[in-house]
Amino acid sequence: MTCDNATPAALTPFPVPRRRTLPHRAWGIAAVAAVAIVTAGAFATVPGLLVTPLENEFGWERGQVSLATAVNMVLYGLTAPFAAAAMGRFGVRRVVPVALVLVGAGALLTSVMTAAWQLTLYWGLLIGIGTGSLTTTFAATVTAHWFVRRRGVVVGGLSAAGHLGQLLFLPLLATGVDRLGWRPPVVTLALVALAVAALAAWALRDHPADVGLAPLGGARPVPRPARAGGAAAHGVRVLGRAARTGTFWLLAGVFAICGASTNGIMWSHWVPAAHDHGVGATAAASMLSLIGIFSALGALASGWLTDRVDPRRLLVVYFGVRALTLLALPQALGAGAGPALVAFTVVYGLVDIATVPPVIALANDRFGADGPIVFGWVNAAHQLGAGLAAFLAAGARELLGGYDPVWLVLSAACLVAAVLAPVVEPAGAARADGR
């Protein structure tokens, strides 16, 4: 029996709720990748905090500690192209957790070391290889697989993630070292790395095809690329093809200067250099964190600009500004932890890792599908420059009694990089495969 005045469901005046559109899976993958990169980035500035405590506890010379840092930076760079090739063969879901376990194990072993060679083995070798697998080559791989649109922004965001790790952890680590000694902060970081390894194993996926999706911005799903046989051999073959082009050597040279003038000197010698001018470790670490904040902002802005402006022009501006800031740094440090040093950290921070999105874009434009691996080799040059700067700066400080000549030399090198950047060939002119 029906009521005469009943309203049919189709005529109901209430709106039918719309089906909620969920964010694309690519954003979740990028978020997990960012957490892994943040964790790896937290280890970058720890050696600078350990220099004085290790000198005091073990009586080691600064050069012995800097050797471990230099080995770490070199392996960090040399691992990247092989890690990119390994991700192509085994997938990020396998490679990333293994890398984080290496990092965690290296940090735990460092906490029980008794000799300087062990610092080189644990922090230099194990952590160098582990963090080297989680560099911007990892960001380039994730972006190339999961994104068609927003690539520049995503690369900028993932590049900023490493410095976000410094921002999040460095002040806490510095305070912990001051109050508790150096071992508890190192063990804490190790446990964080192991926890993130479990997260990555659970949440990461290698390719949109694995879950039946198109990349973000793609019209339809694309098949997963064939797995390359022999990751190490493939990485070397890509290097052989790329090394026959002038573009590769220009990018490698420019990025070597970039490494020397950023993490090579700043993340290893900033705290000791500030200490030489009467700035305490906690205040210096806070300044370094401020650089991290503006590095993140600069990387995001650079990613947005890279989608719209010739990357070569961006590199000219970034290296020019960096040269001027390094030239002014001795005066800023001489004034102590005041407005001049804060101004330096802001301006320097904005161009610190802003170079990464343009260089990745140039590598992808010039070398096509091999772009992430080629960038891995370019990044190896970055870390070679960083390792050389970290090691030589320690010797310069012991020989000359300060870091002022180091800042001047690096300023001049950045001017050279600004001159070299426009020489990179136009898009498509230097494909490593000869096309």
Image: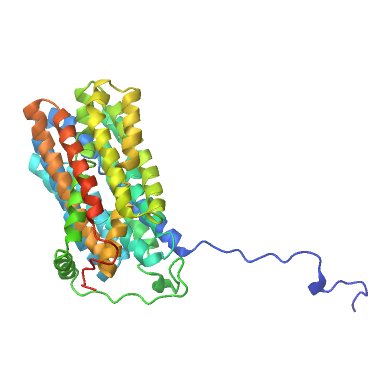
On the image, the x and y values in percent for residue 98 come to: 25, 59
Q: Is residue 198 left or right of residue 121?
A: right
Quadrant occupied by the C terminus: bottom left
Q: Nearer the viewer, residue 20 or 185?
A: 20
Compared to residue 425, the image places residue 398 above or below, namely above
Regarding residue 194, the answer to whether it shows in the image is: no
Looking at the image, which residue sits at the far bottom? 1
Compared to residue 78, the image places residue 112 above or below, namely above
Quadrant occupied by the N terminus: bottom right
Picture residue at 16% right of the left edge, 47% below the top: 385
Q: Nearer the viewer, residue 377 or 435?
A: 435
Compared to residue 18, the image places residue 155 above or below, namely above
- The answer to which quarter of the image holds residue 433 is bottom left
- The answer to which quarter of the image holds residue 278 is top left
Looking at the image, which residue sits at the far right? 4
On the image, the x and y values in percent for residue 112 come to: 17, 41
Q: Nearer the viewer, residue 116 or 351?
A: 351
